[in-house]
């Protein structure tokens, strides 16, 4: 569960939703394009898969051998909540970007440890968790306070 956590996914996992049956990466999720504008005004565009259901959130990016630099997965939380993720069965490091209700980045967990069961928390209520290739936020100088432009946050691209 590349990171379906908080009460959301950890609760799902303990409820047994698909846990025993997860043996490979999920396919066929809806995608959207979102843009992150950093503090210097530089724009970075990502095509992200949308983990919308508890089952999709539980599997997340599990079993992926690569996450290309211009892709990722978004986990919307409605209503906003403290997002708690983990890296169970996730084979590559990820950057977890925790996004507030108005599209402002509230916290980033950089280069998370593959297959770790340690809880990675947003620390504050967020409207979404965005998982990107490990190290990409440092490379692109993406930081807390930067803006995520996506339909979920009422923004036009």
Image (tube, grey):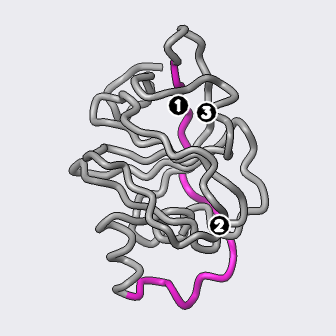
Look at the image and tell me in which quarter the N terminus lies. Answer: bottom right
53 or 7, nearer to the observer: 7
Q: Dot 3 corresponds to which residue?
A: 137
User: Does 94 sit above or below residue 53?
Assistant: above
Mark 2 closeness class: few <14, some 14–19, many ≥20 residues within 10 Å: many
- Residue 19 part of the magenta-drawn span: yes
Distance from disc 2 to disc 3, alpha carbons, whole Å, reads 19 Å
Q: Position of residue 82 (x, y in %)?
A: 28, 53
The residue shown at (52%, 31%) is 34
The reply to whether dot 2 and dot 3 touch (C-beta < 8 Å) is no
Q: Dot 1 corresponds to which residue?
A: 34
Please identify, in this view, whether the residue under mark 3 or under mark 1 is nearer the observer.
Answer: 3
State which tag comes first along the sequence, 1 or 2.
1
Q: Which residues are magenta?
A: 16-37
Q: Dot 2 corresponds to which residue?
A: 90
- Judged from this view, the residue extending furthest toward the top is 41
Q: Position of residue 75 (x, y in %)?
A: 43, 52
The residue shown at (63%, 68%) is 62
Q: Please tell me in which quadrant of the rendered image residue 25 appears.
A: bottom right
- Residue 42 part of the magenta-drawn span: no
Mark 1 closeness class: few <14, some 14–19, many ≥20 residues within 10 Å: many
The residue shown at (64%, 31%) is 138
């Amino acid at each position: 569960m590349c990171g379906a956590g908080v009460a959301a996914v950890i609760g799902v996992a303990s409820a047994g939703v698909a846990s025993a049956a997860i043996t490979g990466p999920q396919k066929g999720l809806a995608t959207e394009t979102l843009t992150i504008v950093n503090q210097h005004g530089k724009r970075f565009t990502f095509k992200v898969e949308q983990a919308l259901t508890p089952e999709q959130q539980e599997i997340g990016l599990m079993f992926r051998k690569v996450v290309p630099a211009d892709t990722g997965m978004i986990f919307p939380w409605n209503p906003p909540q403290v997002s708690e993720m983990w890296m169970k069965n996730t084979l590559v490091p990820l950057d977890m970007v925790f996004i507030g209700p108005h599209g402002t980045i509230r916290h980033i967990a950089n280069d998370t440890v593959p297959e770790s069961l340690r809880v990675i928390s947003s620390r504050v209520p967020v409207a979404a968790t965005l998982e990107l290739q490990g190290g990409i936020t440092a490379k692109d100088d993406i930081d807390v306070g930067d803006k995520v432009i996506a339909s979920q946050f009422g923004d036009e691209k």
